[in-house]
Image: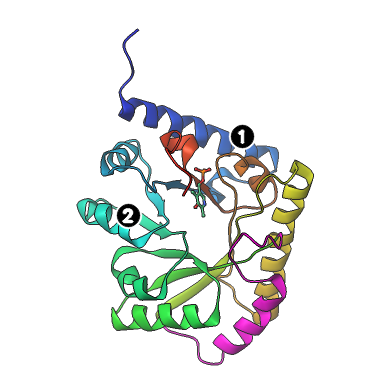
Amino acid sequence: MPRMSVAADIAENLARVRAAITEAAVAAGRRPEEIRLIAVSKTQPAAAVAAARAAGQRDFGENTVQDAMSKIPAFAGKDIAWHFIGRLQTNKVKFIPAHFAWVHSVDSLALLQKVARASEGAGAMLDILLQVNISADPAKQGLAPDALAPLLDSYLRAPSPALRLRGLMTVPALDLPPAALRRAFADLRRLRDDTRTRFGLNAFDQLSMGMSDDFRLAIAEGATMVRVGQAVFGARAKKV
Ligand SMILES: *Cc1c(COP(=O)(O)O)cnc(C)c1O
């Protein structure tokens, strides 16, 4: 048997992941269109992004500004929405508005305000998710759940016209047993719902949760965005 090309592998993986998303949505009584697949292309070459785009994929996630900036310009005009999902260093914020449509990883008031100023300066509009450390894992980034309301109390005194606050994102602790993982996803959903009501934020309707190994569980608990890397592009050489 000849080896399949990498592009064919990616198209086939994408089809499999999309089918699994549909299946998980239907099992949860949800509409599959409510769930956006973000193909996490971190560490992958531009050719892998091109193969996924050719297979109909529109949303891509990157976790370092440097890696992203080496790929994004090649796809100008290709109708791609780029999502920043990694730790955002303050000295890289200035590059965000020209390259990304979404930022999933804002986890402090200072960072939110810095992103707002960059977006205003660029005449951009960014969709923002606040990252929450829902399982209180010391190794994970994100706001403590009870720090979310005070952050919003402060920010909403002078909200930026160049940002839309769209919801919450989380990366749960590694190796949680399925029941605990599911609880963590449900906790994030409740926190999103409570926050949306308490602050009257109608557009605060997104939940970015679930990766290659657990996106089905996340969909069962209400994920509207799943961030899937290895199940689309194959195993990464190293953990990043
Ligand atoms: C790498 C990464 C993903 C994708 O992980 P996979 O296991 O490859 O699906 C999702 N979210 C974040 C924040 C990541 O850094």
Q: Which residue lies furthest to the top in this view?
A: 1
State the residue in front, 52 or 235: 235
Query: What residue do we see at 73% from left, 64% from top?
Result: 190
Q: In this view, does 60 lie above or below 126?
A: above
Query: What residue do we see at 37% from left, 46% from top?
Result: 43
Q: Is 56 positioned to the left or the right of 183 in the image?
A: left
* Residue 72 x, y percent position in the rendering: 27, 55
Q: Is residue 18 above or below residue 60?
A: above
Q: Which of the two discs, 2 and 1, sits closer to the camera? A: 2
Q: Do the residues labelled 2 and 1 touch (CB within 8 Å)?
A: no
Screen quadrant of the N terminus: top left
Q: Quadrant of residue 63?
A: bottom left
Label 2 SS: helix
Residue 136 is inside the magenta segment:
yes
* Residue 240 x, y percent position in the rendering: 46, 50
Q: Is residue 222 above or below residue 52?
A: below
Q: Which amino acid does label 2 sit on?
A: Asp
Q: Which amino acid does label 1 sit on?
A: Glu
Residue behind mark 1:
23
State the residue in front, 48 or 78: 48
* Residue 82 x, y percent position in the rendering: 37, 57
Q: In which quarter of the image is residue 101?
A: bottom left
* Residue interval drawn in magenta: 135-161
Classify mark 2 as within 8 Å of ligand 1 or not, answering yes or no: no
The crowding category of the residue bearing disc 1, from other C-alpha atoms within 10 Å (few below 14, some 14 to 19, many at least 20), is some
Residue behind mark 2:
67
Query: What residue do we see at 56% from left, 45% from top?
Result: 211
